[in-house]
Amino acid sequence: MFSSNLSLDQAPPLSAPLRFFLTAPLFAIIASIFIIVNPEAMFMHKDLMTIAVVHLFTIGYFGLIMLGALQQMLPVLAGVNLPRPVVLATLSHILMVLGTLGLSFGLIYFHSIIMISSLMLFAGFAIILLPSLLLLLKGDFQNPTINGMRIAIVFGLLTVLLGVHLGLSYSNYNFSVLHQSFVDLHIAMGTMGWILVLVISVAFQVIPMFYVTPKFSKFCMKWPFLIAGIILFWGLFVFEIFTGRVVQIVGVLLFVVAMSAFASVGLKRFTQRKRPIADTTVWYWRLSLGSLLLTALVLIAKTVLVLDGLEYLVGVLFGFGFGVSVLNGMLYKIIPFLSWFHLSATGRFDIPTMRDFLPEKGAKRQFYLHLVALIALLISFFIHELLVVAGIVLLLSFLYLWFNLIQATKLYVQESKKEPVMAGGMSWN
Amino acid sequence: MNKEIFVDVRELPAPEPLEVMVNTLGELEFGAYIKMHHRQMPNMLFPILTRNGYGYFVQKGEDEVFVYIYIKKDKQIKKELEDVLK
């Protein structure tokens, strides 16, 4: 028996993570406009417009949501809280917003601002990631989610550092002989090390907790370490310490096995729920994991069968199908919960339910738009002319998502202005 | 022993257990306590309890957690819970 010491307010103020969640869709909206304006560029993976769009999603959307979610998850999953959360969140958020805009517009229009934007992004990430990593390393926590988060944060920081190096190359158009190796490692660390490992680690906790499924097995819990090993192996390949076609195929196949294993077990967990009510977030998870499986298939085709030009499909399936889907699902869980939690923590019991903050009907409609956008993006691979339509649906999908999140926030603001109602004769302190 | 309000939230998806518990807190009176049965540590519940004048004890098992919640000013029930949970 113990009387827990978790008596401090464990959650950061709502404004700290919320600013990240509410700003992120705006970058996806800008990216969608870029796609509509210049669709053909999206099929040339080295085109600067494509690189800008990719970074609007990876930094502006994924990066911001992951930084916001990390601030929120630290107290829930690890029982630790960032010091001065509002100050850190404000600084990081400003740097991330300016850095993302600077990098994406800099790549297309003003190369001179790429370097400063890259440095701002490094600072924006580091302000949240470094103290988070220190807290996670310092604590006595040894659970698979925390281990995975440590690995993901290290890869996140390394990805951004490599990004600063690449930003310098683009800002003065001076590319070293190792440029492509740095690009390949930047992509591997960002996608597999930062995004995939973080999603996997969080899924260990979130899927059983939110959907009442059996836990992941002990073997599954080792995936973050295995992926870290594969990335190191891949690093030796891209810097030509290990060479040869076989090494390349083995490396890709190892990534494919890791992605497929997680996606398959995750999908299976969703068939083992004790209360199988399929809300929109369940569909988002299923779409995300299904897309991850398809990404693995396309990667096999691309590497083993030496099929060129599949980068677009890999990007759409992994970035939008897997990444955006899982984050949208998480936003639909996190925002109503945080709004409700911060109201109830003030001692009020007469507050709206979590469902009231984000009605299922609106979430479901937005999911359908998201699904149509994904299908249209995939068909556009075969019919390039369709990408403009896909871009418009994508834009509508993110506008609708943003509208849903703003509605939830408005209800929170409206409710937070009401006087607390005492319950059970208690006096609130 | 005094009046026990037993709440089993093991099969509820997060964050419903928290919502159920906050609603149940409104029913808690002097001389009574809530015994919550959960499948994991409800970390987000604790600040709500502390902020709003509730005390609690936690019993942790392999795959389950019991949280005993009482009104902090209710010294009698606190002592009884301490004795029982020793």
Image: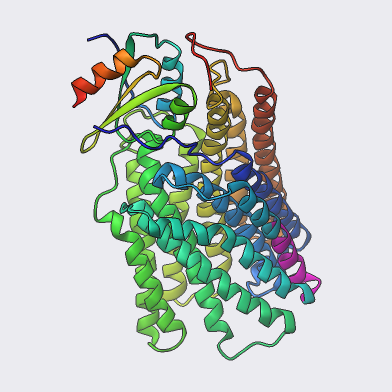
| Residue A168, placed above or below residue A81 | below
Quarter of the image for residue B27 reads: top left
| Residue A293, placed above or below residue A352 | below
Of residues A56 and B70, which is closer to you in this image? B70
Of residues A186 and A276, which is closer to you in this image? A186
Residue A165 drawn at (x, y percent): 61, 79
Residue drawn where x is 48% and y is 69% of the image: A189
| Residue A16, placed above or below residue A182 | above
On the question of residue A184 being in view, the answer is yes
Q: Please say whether residue A274 is one of the residues in the magenta stretch.
A: no
Q: How is the image coloured?
A: rainbow
Direction from residue A149 to residue A391 in the image, left or right: right
What kind of secondary structure does the magenta stretch mostly adopt?
A: helix
Residue at the outermost right position: A109
Q: Please say whether residue A104 is one of the residues in the magenta stretch.
A: yes
Residue at the outermost bottom position: A177
Quarter of the image for residue B4 reads: top left
Direction from residue A390 to residue B35 in the image, left or right: left
Residue A151 drawn at (x, y percent): 41, 63
Residue drawn where x is 24% and y is 16% of the image: B80
| Stretch of the chain drawn in magenta | A97-111
Direction from residue B5 to residue A38 in the image, left or right: right
Residue B44 drawn at (x, y percent): 44, 34
Direction from residue A334 to residue B65 in the image, left or right: left
Residue A107 drawn at (x, y percent): 73, 71
